[in-house]
Amino acid sequence: MGHSDSPHRYPQHQHPLKSSLPKRIILVRHGESQGNKDTAAYTTTPDHKIPLTPSGIHQARLVGETIHRLISDAGSLDSPWSVYFYVSPYDRTRSTLREMGRSFSRRRILGVREECRIREQDFGNFQVEERMRAVKEARERFGRFFYRFPEGESAADVYDRVSSFLESLWRDIDMNRLHHNPNHDLNLIIVTHGLTSRVFLMKWFKWTVEQFEQLNNPGNCEFRVMQLGQGGEYSLAVHHTDEEMEEWGLSPEMIADQKWRAQSRRGDWNEGCPWYLDEFFDRAADSDDSEEGEKSEPVL
């Protein structure tokens, strides 16, 4: 959409070389958890201790194999690429990463960092089923983004900490704290939660609250690939199809913006992006001349 003032935008003389930027940033939701299978688990087990089910473990192994094939260009063993992982501290995300890691050799892994800021939205402490049912109904009426769970967080709170994480992420890249060889393709893999991944994309692409409300949660071990386009902008449209993005809840305008990003140069302004400008200035004059022409004659 508008011009690229996301966290990776620097003054021209400070731009990291395109080759030093990650080729891909991949957001992965954890595998099926016991809480996904039976919400009663939350009444006796703290959210951060909820484990994966056997099906979730299998899903995690499969997604590791799928992502390995994706970034190794269909199995080219000699291609120069590496991965760096960020993972939420919850048991289900840590277990997902452990199973995904079976697909990667140590020489490909630059490192892994446990990152609290990409944890699950806090729904409170132990969750009583009947109470949570009523709370979630209230959230639907109030709005998913701003509703704050009693003793917990709103999606807006998650947005704030994800924003802080993004600032740290780009400092790591800019200062080469990941010890990345610029001749190798770097792939950042972020193993996190459904809402957190949606908020991450919202922050990155500057989607509005209304657009966020229309997004669908990814399924267990589904992933979203943000890949560098030809001009150095990240886009979902490089790897994913229009149909996939539509299923995720992106509007036609949002999909068009992703396709524009896949071809645009860093820092370009998308003139066709309708939100923000048209939303607030739909009655503004097209030029100073037309503005002057619409002024009424002074009353004498």
Image: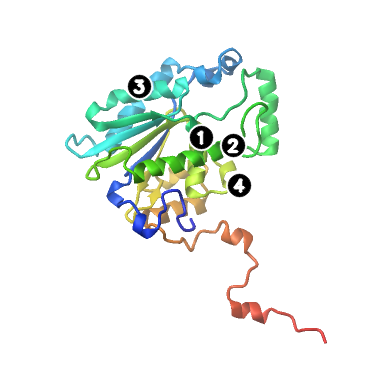
In the foreground, 72 or 242: 72
Q: Earlier in the sequence, mark 1 or mark 3?
A: 3
**Residues at marks 2 and 3, CA–CA distance in whole angstroms:** 30 Å
Picture quadrant of residue 57? top left
Please tell me how crowded label 4 is: few (under 14), some (14-19), or many (20+) other residues with Cα within 10 Å: few
Q: Earlier in the sequence, mark 2 or mark 4?
A: 2
**Residues at marks 4 and 3, CA–CA distance in whole angstroms:** 36 Å
Q: Residue at x 48, y 63 (%)?
A: 271
Please tell me how crowded label 1 is: few (under 14), some (14-19), or many (20+) other residues with Cα within 10 Å: many
Picture quadrant of residue 184? top left
Q: Is residue 76 above or below residue 270?
A: above
**Residues at marks 4 and 1, CA–CA distance in whole angstroms:** 17 Å
Q: Label 2 belongs to which residue? A: 157
Q: Position of residue 269 (x, y in %)?
A: 45, 61
Q: Of the residues shown, which amino acid type is indicated by label 3? A: Glu
SS at badge 3: helix
In the foreground, 154 or 62: 154
Picture quadrant of residue 224? top left
Q: Of the residues shown, which amino acid type is indicated by label 1? A: Thr
Label for residue 99? 3
Can you see residue 44? yes
Q: Of the residues shown, which amino acid type is indicated by label 4? A: Glu
